Amino acid sequence: MSNFDKIEFNKKALDMSTKKRKNNRKKLSTKLIVSIIVIIIAIGLAVGFPAYATYNSGLKTYREARILLDAVKKQDIELASQELIKTKK
């Protein structure tokens, strides 16, 4: 048994490679999280702006329709016809 030399492994090299892998995992996970957040924000903006414009258009039409309804209830034919033309646009 004395003919064999004892082999010692360098623990520092093993530790360095392990640290590098952990750092790479952290970098990869942060990049992944940031890119997912950016994608979610982009989708939110892509859906949000047209939805907001549609909402405002609906409110405008609703206001004009309320004015038209009030004019019809008061039997103001001239105002009702003007508001009907506005609502059709």
Image (cartoon, rainbow, N blue to C red):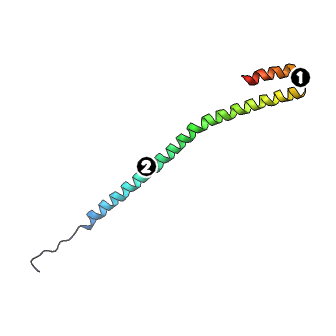
The circle on residue 76 is 1
**Residue at left offset 47%, top offset 50%:** 33
Residue 54's x, y, as percent?
Answer: 66, 33
The circle on residue 31 is 2
Q: Is residue 59 left or right of residue 68?
A: left
Earlier in the chain: of badge 1 and badge 2, it is: 2
**Residue at left offset 73%, top offset 33%:** 59
**Residue at left offset 76%, top offset 32%:** 62
**Residue type (three-letter) at the residue carrying disc 1:** Asp
The N terminus lies in quadrant = bottom left
Quadrant location of residue 74?
Answer: top right
Judge whether 60 appears above or below 21 on screen: above
Q: Do the residues labelled 1 and 2 touch (CB within 8 Å)?
A: no
Q: Is residue 2 left or right of residue 10?
A: left
The residues bearing labels 1 and 2 have C-alpha atoms spaced at a distance of 65 Å
The C terminus lies in quadrant = top right
Quadrant location of residue 84?
Answer: top right
**Residue type (three-letter) at the residue carrying disc 2:** Lys
Residue 86's x, y, as percent?
Answer: 76, 22
Judge whether 13 appears above or below 41 on screen: below
Q: Is mark 1 on a helix, strand or loop?
A: loop
Please rate how many residues cluster around mark 1, counting C-alpha atoms within 10 Å: few if below 14, some from 14 to 19, many from 20.
few
Q: Which of 16 and 46 is in front in this view?
A: 46
Judge whether 18 appears above or below 41 on screen: below
Residue 21's x, y, as percent?
Answer: 34, 58
